[in-house]
Amino acid sequence: MQAFEYQPTSHRKEHPMQTLILNGSPRKNGDTAALLSHLQKHLQGEIIEISAYYDNISPCIDCRRCKESGICVIPDQMQDVYKIIETCDNIIIASPIYFSELTGRLLDTASRLQTYYYGMQKNHGHPVKKPKRGGVLLVGGGEGDPEIAYATAVRILHYMKAKEIYPLICSHRTDEIPAAEDGAVLAQIRELAAFLHRD
């Protein structure tokens, strides 16, 4: 997977709906990818997908420099992601369930939102000005508790100022039925797309 190239909103000819996807799966053609592919078929506007495994984003190193400045100083791809979070309309978190949680690499990426936590403490308001809508797509083979991973994902979405979050969508029988064939979940994804498009 090639690294994405971010084009600032001011340089785009139009201003379509913009959706940021944080993909926590290591499998490029697995069940998570299948659900995201179905979602993208029903989304309008610009879609930017970030891979926790394949894009250049390091975990927070707890240097605490953002505590004073409000700015993360790690010079990697997350700097572009912060810009996208500022401008996007929707944020989707997608992940397999590992030990009832989001994948470790996705949690590593989320740890870089620490700068928002300090920003809220210092400024008594959210550093991200534009509210968003959010959604969570999870897949699992039947073990583990998707509600735990969903609660973590919702907390992460709140740090990115997702004010309205669609209920959990989870294909939780992938050992028996591939996510791409889970009709009930595919129908929920179409409903999620409609929710994201709502005025």
Image (cartoon, rainbow, N blue to C red):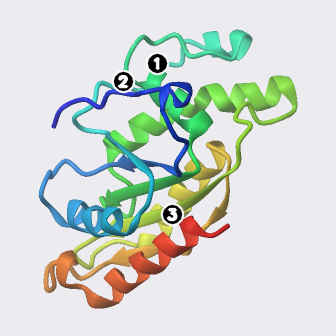
Which residue is pictured at 42% across the width and 35% down the height?
A: 109
C-alpha separation, residue under disc 2 versus residue under disc 3: 24 Å
Say which of 172 and 185 sits in front.
185
Q: Which part of the image, by quadrant, shows the N terminus? A: top left
Which residue is pictured at 37% across the width and 58% down the height?
A: 94
Say which of 90 and 150 sits in front.
90
Q: What residue type is labelled 3?
A: Gly
Q: What residue type is labelled 1?
A: Ile
Pointer 1: residues within 10 angstroms few (<14), some, or many (20+)? few
Would residue 18 be found to the left or right of residue 107 on screen?
Answer: right
- From this view, report whether residue 174 is shown above or below residue 93: below
In this figure, which residue is indicated by the disc labeled 1?
61
Quadrant in the picture for residue 49: top left
Q: Which part of the image, by quadrant, shows the C terminus? A: bottom right
Q: Residue 127 in the image: x percent, y percent? A: 73, 30
| Contact, mark 2 vs mark 3 (Cβ under 8 Å) | no
Q: What residue type is labelled 2?
A: Ser
| Contact, mark 2 vs mark 1 (Cβ under 8 Å) | yes
Mark in front: 2 vs 3: 3
Q: Is mark 3 on a helix, strand or loop?
A: strand
Q: What element carries label 1?
A: loop
Would residue 73 be found to the left or right of residue 66 on screen?
Answer: left
Q: Residue 46 in the image: x percent, y percent? A: 42, 47
In this figure, which residue is indicated by the disc labeled 2?
58
Q: Residue 135 carries which label?
A: 3
